Amino acid sequence: MKRIIVAIDGFSSCGKSTMARKLAAEVGYVYVDTGAMYRAVSLFCLRNGWMTAETMDEAAINAHVGRIKLEFRLNDSGKAEMYLNGENVEHEIRTLEVANGASRVSTLGAVRRELVRQQQLMGEKKGIVMDGRDIGTVVFPEAELKVFLTASPEIRAQRRYDELLGKGEQAVYDEVLANVVERDERDQNRAESPLRKADDAIVIDNSDLTPDEQQQRLRELFQQKISE
Ligand code: DC
């Protein structure tokens, strides 16, 4: 059976990871969450004091980016978890502070070049589903299937808000929405590999789709590509 690269890009809190992870499990491909890699770099910079809520020491980050070892290891349930220099950081990287840091650290050219290099190695043998912001445009411009996932900022903020409350965290909807809008703005307007749809990507707007409908659409696109 032909093995392909599936590139899924789109805005934050769109449900890209859930959709990508499910497809990978269904078809026996490796799933790579590139957002987790930028989050791990963010955590590393926060811990070392090279980044705070207000500042970012670009020179220090550039000098140390080669020292950051990132790996995905499967847990007992078969879910890939992020390891930073040998430490499981899957839980720590999911906070708002780390997400905001990731959005900032991902604007740096040296960080992007290093992570893109690692991501390209992971996809050398194909049979991979990778999600992020620049997968179809920069990491794998030759990917056989490219999907650009989108939904309105209000719907994404509502989903993120529900998720936070579900985890027992405090949240104010307007603040979550403002954060979604701010991250969209930074992702789309940074100089290095801004988020944009690849010309040959297929758009899925999931504002009005159920998770099952969305998965079915992706499954059909995948089947179509591997039988071409
Ligand atoms: O998908 P996420 O929320 O986990 O991503 C965290 C941040 O990393 C997000 O603000 C954008 C950035 N990112 C990126 O610039 N390129 C990628 N391929 C993946 C994520």
Image (cartoon, rainbow, N blue to C red):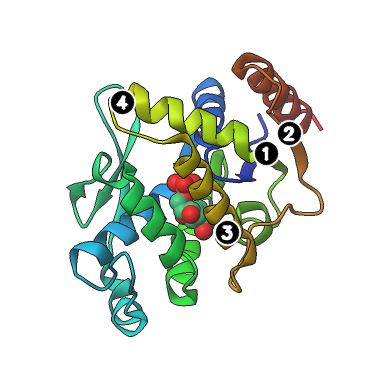
> Which residue, given by chain and number where applicable, does mark 2 sit on?
204
Going by the numbered disc 3, the residue's amino acid type is: Asp
Residue reaching furthest bottom?
59
Going by the numbered disc 2, the residue's amino acid type is: Ile
> Which residue, given by chain and number where applicable, does mark 3 sit on?
187
Which numbered mark, 2 or 1, is in the foreground of this view? Answer: 1
Q: Is residue 206 visible?
A: yes
The disc label shown at residue 7, or none: none
Considering depth in this image, is 58 or 227 the residue closer to the camera? 58
Between marks 1 and 4, how big is the CA–CA gap?
24 Å
Going by the numbered disc 4, the residue's amino acid type is: Lys
Placement of the C terminus among the 4 image quadrants: top right
Between marks 2 and 1, how big is the CA–CA gap?
6 Å
From this view, report whether residue 209 is shown above or below residue 42.
above
Look at the numbered disc 1 and say if its residue's Cβ is closer than 8 Å to ligand 1.
no
Tell me if mark 3 has few (under 14), some (14-19) or many (20+) residues whose alpha carbon lies within 10 angstroms of its own: many
Look at the numbered disc 3 and say if its residue's Cβ is closer than 8 Å to ligand 1.
yes
From this view, report whether residue 215 is shown above or below residue 55.
above
Apparent side of residue 183 relative to residue 216 in the rendered image (left or right):
left
SS type, badge 2: strand
